[in-house]
Image (cartoon, rainbow, N blue to C red):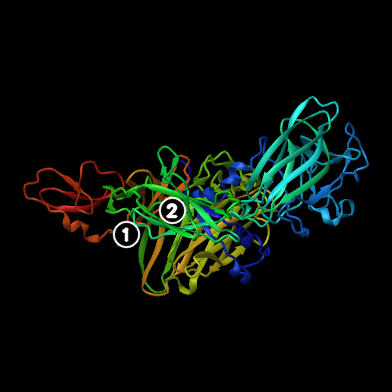
Amino acid sequence: MVNFTHYLLSAATVAALSGLDANAVNPSELVSATPKVISVAKADLLGAKSAKKSVSHRAPVKKVKTKSPHKVTHFPLTEDELEVLYTCSCSFLTEGSETEPAELELDDWDNIPEELIGEENYGFGGQGLMQAGGAMYVPFQYTDPDDDSWEMEGMFWTPDLYEAMTVTIELDAKIVEGSDVESDELWAYASDYSNLLDSDYDEIDTEWKRVSITLDISSFVQESEDDSYYFTLFADNGADIVVKDIVIKGEKPELQVPVAENYTDYTGTSFTAHWAEVENATGYYLTVYNYDVAEGEATSIFLDAEYTEETSYTVEGLTVGNFYSYEVTATNGSFTTAPSNTIFVCELVSPTGLEITPSSDHKSLNFTWEASQSANYYVLNVSAVHDVTANEEVTLADADFSAIESTGTVAAPVESEYWYDSLSELPGWQFSLGCSAEGAYGFMDNSLYTYYTGLYASLESMDYDLSNIKDGKVSVSVEAASPGNGMLVGLLSFNKDEDKYEVGSAYATPDDVPEDFETYNFTLTGASAQSRFIFMTRTADNADGSILIRTLKLTGVAAENGTVKLPLGEIETEETQESVECEIEEGVTYCAYVVPYLVDDDGYILAIGAPSDTATYKAESSGVDSVIASDNDSVTSYYNLQGQKIDRPVKGSVVIKVNNTEATKIVL
């Protein structure tokens, strides 16, 4: 199952932190950034289309299309005919031939220069493109001119479009003369800059053929995380191809696909579905499904979609505890749109009965709770609340990785086998795309991995309650090394009014972190009642990099007598019991809550319930008083500090030794 409770850096977070000047500390411009922290499985729901669908039938590409620096003005479309949006005759490619293609210089945006193709068609481009005497030569693979060890895919792409519509791509195409491949598939992919929107292909061979491929982008508004999309053309099975006389035609749909909105008034037996109004629609068809999680099947609970002229509908007659979903289409009487996005309906009951008990050796905490109806997965969040006095220096984190054994080096670290790693040396923190070197642990950027999954290498903490830290100021000392990348560190604070995390302050190393370990000391400000820390690499665009950490220490000063809450970890489980290893300290209050989830077999989140009530446990120094020594005791017995009898004390634990004459507190 996909590990889904660790956190994904949003593009806004990365952009905000990556935009730092090399010597910037606490830049004010970061306050306006709007990073959000979402779980990986939520990211799968929002962006898995890119993680899965954007992978072509071949190996991943090294380069991706960069957005054109300006938009191209389009003529408005009529409703009853196709409008020619772009053309690329390729007649300007006068040099070379099929058998001896000539070089084609693309501009800095990997596009054909405007002086060749004209401003109205600017945006046609690609990678590996060459001239073939009046045609565009698109190789199946070519060698990256910046790295001759890297074989890349040849592909041709179109300018951006900005409106949802049905688009037809027409072009002449053939396999080049003398090719070992006699037939191939010419694919057309429609993509925004995050997701695959639609795709189709046509067969081509060694003779010129007029190819026509129609793709439906009418759901672009719902599917896209961007404001524009484009088309990519390539041969899929090994052929070098030539293309010419490309024409892009478009037709707007009569109605836009509706956007389904969150339901309200869920009672267990009913709920009210909502969706946004669609211009020119005379009504809507609502379809509600009874979703079988175990089988992964959805069955409509209406024989036909329910019709309404409103933008909401109350669905009744449901079964308590069942899982439902709904989607909606719009109609004007003669045309009905494609279905909207899907809204899942399920209220997960908050877990109850959460209890915390210490282990007999006082080196871990045990947690148990009652199962939540409809939930099949849980996330346990554990923290420790420390009593502090005014002006006391409080250690928020103190990690030493120098004992880690690894065959890796700073120049060539060993990648982790997992997307996320939790290490006992730093409880409550997660390494995304972790890596190790001898005596160090860190994180390792992989540009291709980031492109296809949206995940960035980082070290990120759980939430801290730093409301009692003086001036919201945290001192950081980190001993780090790198093969030649900068390091970015951010302190994020949650804005309840805006319901998002914002960059309170940040730090960037003045220069690249050297290969020999160096200690960096700096201060972050803006700590609040819900704050977290992020460490990232600073690399060139689409570059790989890593940061290795030997030691990390965070401290703050208590503003007044009170408490400071420090995270201990998050545990994911399908069970209703778990344990967390930690040295239980007297006087510290340990607290925990459980969040119920409903996930499918692939780990995608279908529903998230409200967290349980917070349970607490405090290890009191009076635990020895609960041990009673009887005059009849003739043999030695051992008890933990809570008075529970221990059959086999563990070496290093603190216990009470009892015989018929005395009770003694000892350390074994």
For the point 58% across and 53% down, the residue is 333
Q: Label 1 sits on what residue type?
A: Asp
Which residue corresponds to mark 2?
427
Q: Residue furthest front?
A: 333
Q: Quadrant of residue 385?
A: bottom left
Left or right: 2 in relation to 639 = right
Seen from the viewer's position, the closer of residues 188 and 613 is 188
Residue under numbered circle 1: 613
Pair 2/1: label in front: 1
Name the side, left or right, on which 199 lies relative to 403.
Answer: right
Q: Secondary structure at mark 2?
A: loop
97 or 480: nearer the eye?
Answer: 97
The CA span between labels 2 and 1 is: 22 Å
Residue furthest to the left in view is 632
Q: Is residue 64 above or below residue 33?
A: above
CB atoms of marks 2 and 1 within 8 Å: no
